[in-house]
Each structure stands twice: as C-alpha cells, then as structure tokens.
Amino acid sequence: MENNVFTYIEEEGKRQEKNIELIASENFVSEDVKKAVGSCLTNKYAEGYPSKASIEKFCLTHPDYVHYGKTGRYYGGCENVDMVELEAMYWCRKAFHTDYHCNVQPHSGSQANSAAFASVLTPGDTILAMNLEQGGHLTHGSPVNFSGNIYNAVHYTVDDRGFIDYGDIEAKIKEFHPALVVAGASAYSRVIDFARIRGIIDSLSTDEYKPYFMVDMAHIAGLVITGEHPTPFGLADIVTTTCHKTLRGPRGGLIFSRPELAKKVDSAIFPYSQGGPLLHIIAGKAVAAREACTEEYRAYIHQVVLNTRAMADRFIELGYEVVTGGTDNHLFMIDFTRTHPNLSGKAVQDELDKHFITLNKNCVPNEKRSPMQTSGVRIGTAAMTTKGWKEQDAVECADRIDRILRSM
Ligand code: DSN
C-alpha cells in the first residue's frame, strides 16, 4: 500500500493557507519553530533532566540562570539535548518575566495539568475549578476526564452576564475546603482577576487549611507575556500552559511552579506520568519563547486584542449576542439562544466550513443543547493576526459571516 501521508500534509498546508482560521486555540508557528520541531532531536531519548555538568556549562554563558528541580539523565549522549532543554527553561522564564521553576517537558496541556495536580494532590482530594459548560476546561474536573475521576471536583460558575462569579468561588471554598483552586478557562473572554482569587484564598486560609492555587493560562499565555492580561506569577503556586495558542509555539505544555515545588513537579512529570521528553518539541518551545521576547511579538499580541474587540463589536452591531457583552482578550463567544434560536453552534460551524471559515461550536452559559450541538460558537483572532489581519479585516469577516448566517 502506498503511504499517502505527504499528500495529506500538502493538502492540509493548502487548507491552512486558504481558510480563515478562527479557532481561538490555534495559531501559525514561525519557520524557525517548524525547523526545530522537524529536527533530528526527535531521534534522541533523554529520560530525566539536564545534568549538573550541563547546568554548570549553561551558566557560563547565562550567569543569571538559577536552576531548581531535578538533575540527571538515564541515557548517554545527552550533552546537546541538555543544552536545548536549558535554553527552553531559560527563555520560557524570560518570556513570562518570572523566576518560578519551569518544567518544559509536558507533552500537552492535559499532561501539564495532570502532573501539576499529581504534584500537590492525592487521589480523592477536592479541586475547585470553573465549570466546563461555562468556559472551563475538560481537565479541570470534568466527569468524563481523569481530573473528575481521580479527584473530587467541584465547580464555580459565571453570573447572569457570563462573568466569573467570584462570590461563588468564595462560597465554594468555604463549603468544600478544596485542596486546590484552579483559575483559567478555554472559553472566557474577560480578564480573570488572579489577585482577587489569591485574596479570597488567603482570607479563608488558616494554620490547618491552606489550599494551593493553580492557574491554567493556556489561552491567554501570550497576553500574560506582553502585559495585555494580568500575570498569575507571584500569585499562583503553580502555573500551567500550552505553547500553541497565543504563545505561538509548537503543540505542548509547560508547568511553572514556586521553587519549593520544583522537585515535586519534576517527579510528577518524570517518572510519574511521562517517559522520554520530546526534545524536538522542547527545542520548538525554546524558539517560540525567544520570539515572544521581541517587540514584534508585543505588537502582534496588541493587534490580536484590537482585532478581537473590533470583530466582537461588529457582531453586536449586527444584532448578535456576545457573551459578557464584549471581550478583553483574543476570543469571544456568540450565544444564538435569544437572537437566533433556530441556529445551533454545530449548524453554524458546518455551514461556515463550506465557506472556508473555520471555527468551533461551543457551549454557552446556561446551555440548553448538548455539547455536540451547542447554542454558540467561539471565535478567536490569534491565527489570522499572525497572517496580518488588522481591525478592518476582522470587521469585514464579521460582515461576511453575518451574510452567510442570514442565508441559512
Ligand atoms: N484548550 C482547548 C481549546 O481551547 O480549544 C482544547 O483542549
């Protein structure tokens, strides 16, 4: 049988070039990131972490680097990949302006969250996080996910307008005494007030009870880097992220932690939940993090925020209901329930696919339809801003989507 994989890669390249990409969790990486990810590093096994000798060598050229966490590999020949991993740890910390420990090995955001939980929790512990149906994430305690099975998950909610209900966070901490409070979302268009959540946790902590605070900043990582969203560093004990959304790196995850948790986090990745790290991906993370330290990247993220706001505002002018009435970040949600009750998120997604516009159906607060149908869609502009979109392009796209939906 012929192997057609290169044909499909070529076809997918054409699709990515041609389509308008509005999936809020996607982006287009640089040629340098692709070069790293497609490199010979994929051939190398390197279970463990960079050796003490490699760290000493790295510090000769990066005297500001301070190492936390585990050291030592289980295989020979790791002298080059050690330096790659140290570069990734160094640039990820630089990009986020933090001296937290950084583990660059998680294969994905889910793996990062799984290990982050395992580092500070024991099975059966209670976690408090945002509801998946209202914008949270699968790995934040959904009953169909490991997180909702291994741990006792309780959820906070959003208010009538779709904003996080901080009063509910406080009430749920008082009622359930979670061992870990999680902030972060995959479909939430507003600033998350990490300082306020830290304040709530501190006000309810005692000598006997002190929950950990974890932020999953996967969606907004790029905005955190450039200051378009408040940083969780200095507030959260653990911060996880993916690298492939607004951060614009390869698929994969990161875990940052306060230095005192470094060894626990490292052990929770290897040997607890992963084997050999993907060094080619880690190289891509290093390249992307370095790129995120540039002025060009700062301007890019600022443009993402402008484009998203322009597009959300246009949809509101056109008579659509945008959840929370707008956006502060790279995405927004349209809720068809009241304005277009005959439209489901799935029908809209399928129709737009035919017009080469790609987005995803999404549950909205107080969703009445199933997750396979939904009453809303999620729209993000990070990918199209990489392709050069300005506000006018975003507005024209909203007009075009409106014309298509009116003919449905
Ligand atoms: N992070 C999700 C998304 O936002 O698309 C998928 O896990």
Image (cartoon, helix red, strand yellow):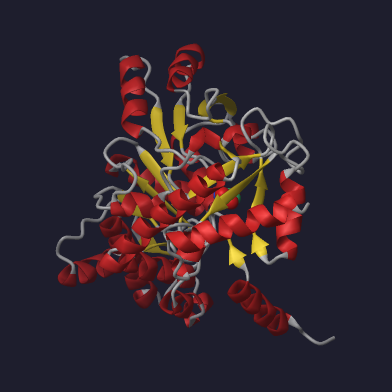
The residue at 54%/61% (across/down) is 396
Looking at the image, the residue that sits furthest to the top is 175
- Quadrant housing residue 103: bottom left
Please tell me which residue lies in front, 7 or 275: 7
Residue 268 image position (x, y, % from top left): 47, 46
**Residue 162 in sight from this viewpoint:** yes
Against 32, residue 72 (above or below) is: above
Q: Residue furthest bottom?
A: 2
Camera-nearest residue between 141 and 353: 353
Query: Residue visible at 35% across and 76% down?
Result: 79
Q: How many marks?
A: 0
- Which sits in the foreground, 257 or 32? 32
Q: Is residue 244 visible?
A: no
Report whether 49 appears left or right of 143. Answer: left
- In the image, is residue 14 above or below residue 89? below
Q: Which quadrant of the view contains residue 141?
A: top right
In percent of width and height, residue 166 lies at 43, 22
Foreground pick, 275 / 188: 188
Q: Is residue 306 left or right of residue 252?
A: left
Q: Position of residue 251 (x, y in %)?
A: 52, 62
User: Height in image: 338 above or below 23?
Assistant: above
Residue in view at x 43 percent, y 59 percent: 391
Q: Position of residue 215 (x, y in %)?
A: 41, 39
Q: Residue at x 72, y 62 (%)?
A: 353
Q: Is residue 372 left or right of residue 20?
A: right
